[in-house]
Amino acid sequence: MDDKIKDAMHQAYTGESKAALRLKVFAEQAEKDAYTQLAKLFRVISFSEEIHGKRALRLLKEIKSTEENLADSFESETQVAGVAYDNFIQRAEEVGDKAASLYFSQSRDVEEGHAKLYKEAMNHVLEEKETTYYVCMVCGYVSDGVLPEECPVCGVNKEKFVGFE
């Protein structure tokens, strides 16, 4: 693929991914505001944007074998947690933005947990073990197989977790 086309495809993927998430959040807000038809529209367009993003990933040949995808995901999480968020935290602290610093710190801690989960996932596959994951709805922390009494990252109680079986 031509380098300029590849760059454009990455930009398109990034834009579609951001739009899909943004529209999901907009749908949640519309539901809260009792605009069920608008919520549905936001969800439908979000789904459409996901299709665009998936097509871009396929064209970029970024979808590989599950083993390669797992290794790439581990590497990405490690990179984000170890480099990007540390820089973001430093910037937030320099300007005294405590809310941003807390967000970046908690996100970094969760990203480090994601990397560990990817490492553990291969052991689960080898052991043919199925696990339930629990996700904190406040900070995104993921627990493997155990519903914590409180989130080790942000401190909310177990009622704020969602299980994935």
Image: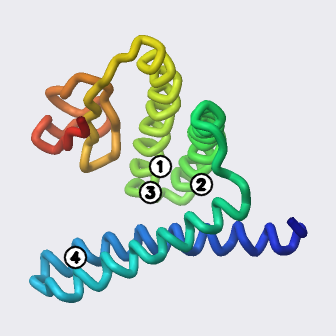
What kind of residue is marked 3?
Answer: Ala
Residue 51 place in picture, x, y as percent: 50, 70
Q: Are marks 3 and 1 in contact (CB under 8 Å)?
A: yes
Between the C-alphas of marks 3 and 1, the distance is: 6 Å
Residue of label 2: 91
Under tag 2, what secondary structure?
Answer: helix
Residue 19 place in picture, x, y as percent: 47, 75
The label shown at residue 100 is 3
Image quarter hosting the C terminus: top left
Between the C-alphas of marks 1 and 4, the distance is: 24 Å
Viewer-side label of 2, 4: 4
Residue 155 vs residue 144, the one in the foreground: 144
What kind of residue is marked 4?
Answer: Gln
Under tag 1, what secondary structure?
Answer: helix
Between the C-alphas of marks 3 and 2, the distance is: 9 Å
Viewer-side label of 1, 4: 4
Which class describes the residues within 10 Å of circle 1: few (<14), some (14-19), or many (20+)?
many
Residue 30 place in picture, x, y as percent: 20, 81
Residue of label 4: 29
Image quarter hosting the N terminus: bottom right
Which badge, 3 or 4, comes first in the chain's sequence?
A: 4
Q: Report whether residue 82 is seen.
A: no
The label shown at residue 104 is 1
Query: Residue at 58% of width from left, 52% of height from top?
Result: 88
Which badge, 1 or 4, comes first in the chain's sequence?
A: 4
Query: Residue at 46% of width from left, 24% of height from top?
Result: 121
Residue 2 vs residue 134, the one in the foreground: 2
Residue 94 vs residue 81, the one in the foreground: 81
Q: As drawn, is 66 to the left or to the right of 146?
A: right
